Amino acid sequence: MLHEPDAWMWWTFWQVVLTSKGVSIGLVDFKGPPGPDGRIAVGFSFAPAFWDRGYATEAVGALVAWALRQSGVRSITADTNVTNVRSHRVLQKLGFAPAEHVAGGMVRHGDPGDLLVWRLVKAGV
């Protein structure tokens, strides 16, 4: 952020709050501003007690919708562990498709594992 202070939104974690209970249930984020190719990456993590209720789909969907309205964005990627079926379902519901399998990538707190890279291309691109 020191090198790109005007790009703070692209480096921010957004807390997802369930207002009816007044509790934080997860985080969504971008992994930085659009690159020269117009690609950005998103990430998300939710508390297990709130899985399978549509909250991740709603929150990530809002983040993705906002990003797609930005002129510099042409595509969005997301990395998941190949075994993370819940995250796969969230991304599939939002229109992402598997794009690449990366053996031995870094997942969850730097632990090694195979990654599935998902991609969503902006309409009209």
Image: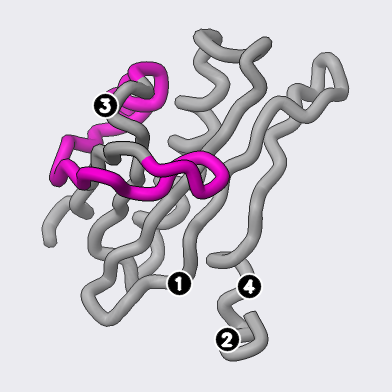
Tell me residue 56's x, y (percent): 52, 26
Where does label 4 land, which residue? 8
For the residues labelled 3 and 1, the Cα–Cα distance comes to 23 Å
Where does label 3 land, which residue? 92
Contact? badges 2 and 4 (CB < 8 Å): no
Contact? badges 2 and 3 (CB < 8 Å): no
Q: Determine whether the residue tagged by mark 3 lies in a helix, strand or loop.
A: helix
Which amino acid, by three-letter code, is at mark 1?
Pro
Specify the quadrant of the image occupied by residue 69.
Answer: bottom left
Q: Earlier in the sequence, mark 3 or mark 1?
A: 1
Q: Residues within 10 Å of mark 3 (few under 14, many from 20)?
A: some
Tell me residue 9's x, y (percent): 60, 66
Q: Determine whether the residue tagged by mark 4 lies in a helix, strand or loop.
A: helix
For the residues labelled 2 and 3, the Cα–Cα distance comes to 32 Å
Where does label 2 land, which residue? 4
Which amino acid, by three-letter code, is at mark 2?
Glu
For the residues labelled 4 and 1, the Cα–Cα distance comes to 9 Å
Q: What is the number of the mark on residue 33?
A: 1
Q: Residues within 10 Å of mark 4 (few under 14, many from 20)?
A: few
For the residue pair 97 and 47, the one nearer the viewer reads as: 47
Task: Examine the rendered structure and indicate whether residue 83 appears above or below residue 71.
Answer: above
Is residue 97 shown left or right of residue 47?
Answer: left
- Residue lying at the far bottom of the rendered structure: 3
For the residues labelled 3 and 4, the Cα–Cα distance comes to 28 Å
Contact? badges 2 and 1 (CB < 8 Å): yes
Contact? badges 3 and 1 (CB < 8 Å): no
For the residue pair 78 and 16, the one nearer the viewer reads as: 78
Tell me residue 51's x, y (percent): 56, 13
Which amino acid, by three-letter code, is at mark 4?
Trp
Q: Residue at x 15, y 45 (%)?
A: 100
Q: Earlier in the sequence, mark 2 or mark 3?
A: 2
Q: Identify the colour scheme used.
A: one colour
